[in-house]
Amino acid sequence: MTVLFIFKYIGFFTENLNHLPFVQLPVPQITLPIGISFFTFQAISYVVDVYRGHVAQKSLWDVMLYIAFFPQLIAGPIVRYSDFADQIRNRQESLQKLAKGGYRFALGLGKKVILSNNLAYVADAAFSSVGNLSLSMAWLGAIGYSLQLYFDFSGYSDMAIGLGQMFGFRFLENFNYPFISRSITELWRRWHISLGSWFRDYVYIPLGGSRVKTKHRLYLNIFVVWLLTGAWHGAKWTYIAWGMMYFVLLCAERILGWSGKKTWYSWLYTIYFFVAGNVVFRSENVTGAIKYLLAMFNIHTSGLTDAKAVYYFAEYIPFLIMGIVAAMPIAVWLRSRTGRFKEVINRLYPIWCAAVFLVALSFVVKGGYNPFIYFDF
């Protein structure tokens, strides 16, 4: 944890301490290793599980392989050693696993290269124009970024899971169609599952979880979890504000009993706050986030629409439509059908994966825009 603090947060703390009277400390300029939060959290989970007696490993090489396993090293999912240890010695490679892993990798690459990278153009255009946004451009950018973030992150997870499967390893799922969630509670059971379960098992439950004597202690536990969740994403006040937003929403759902609601308006409010939270998450500072959120309600904006909004909507509407469709569990529904229809879908699946891979490969060869959004992580 000390290593994580020095590399990731010491500069942030020093900058904020310098705002105090008579404090002028040199701000360390330390290059942040890519993916440090992911592999540090894996190492922490291993140490804690050894302390609890859940795992015991005498092979240094096996532990090093676990922490430095390349498919999920820099972008997750966060893997527990208990889920990994037995597979080191007893995994079995096969052509079937190689093929299934390859299909999963191809779909993940398609999510990242075809959808996320193209939706990034829309998001960047909107977030670079904060203070001069029309209402339609503000919403277009916010929705575009939400889809970009999802396909980037879930795409990397799919590629990691696929690569692991090709080598005989099985990783747990990291995303489960979060856009169909009908409460914030459900959203965080479907989004970045490995991080949510890590904070649940190593922070929330040790603090007492929900089995505490008073509501105040319960809300304190949730506050600590979401303060740390926000800080985990990076050393910026926008991440802290993002975490506090979800703390308030989750507490409100508990108080009002909304977490079990299954209605269209509960879905609508969940998606709205998810998109609004992503605006805070993406913004450079809290002031910029507030300006952007105000633009989404046409407060002090440049009108309902403008030429930029019309251009980006016309230019990237295919990727927006494909993104919305791909974010829904349509493929799961198709593959769960019975009879002749299911047989046809299963036979077409390898062809579909190959087609996605070839299209993604063409985007890579063409050398298009390829943003990497994990530098803060």
Image (cartoon, grey):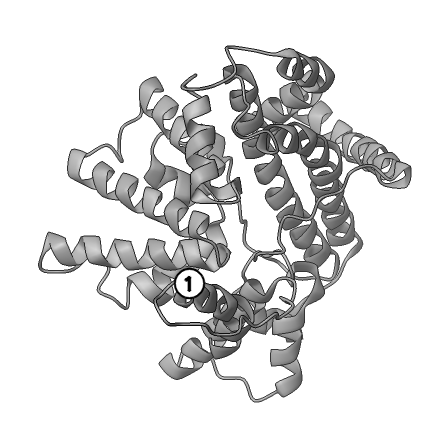
**Mark 1: secondary structure:** helix
Q: Dot 1 corresponds to which residue?
A: 16
Give how far across and how far down residue 233 sits, in percent. Answer: 49, 55
Give how far across and how far down residue 230 sits, in percent. Answer: 42, 53
Total labels: the figure holds: 1
Give how far across and how far down residue 257 sits, in percent. Answer: 19, 34
Image-based side of 53 in relation to 318, left or right: left
Instruction: Specify the quadrant that holds the C terminus.
Output: bottom right
Inspect this view and state whether residue 337 appears. no
Q: Amino acid at mark 1?
A: Asn
Q: Check disc 1: other Cα within 10 Å, few if <14, some if 14-19, many if 20+.
A: few
Looking at the rendering, which quadrant does residue 126 occupy? top right
Vertical comparison of 251 with 230: above or below:
above
Give how far across and how far down residue 271 sits, in percent. Answer: 42, 28
Looking at the rendering, which quadrant does residue 321 occupy? top right
Please report the residue visible at 75 percent of the width from the left and 56 percent of the height from the top.
166
Inspect this view and state whether residue 71 appears. yes
Image-based side of 1 in relation to 147, left or right: left
Please report the residue visible at 50 percent of the width from the left and 11 percent of the height from the top.
303
Residue nearer the viewer, 324 or 372: 372
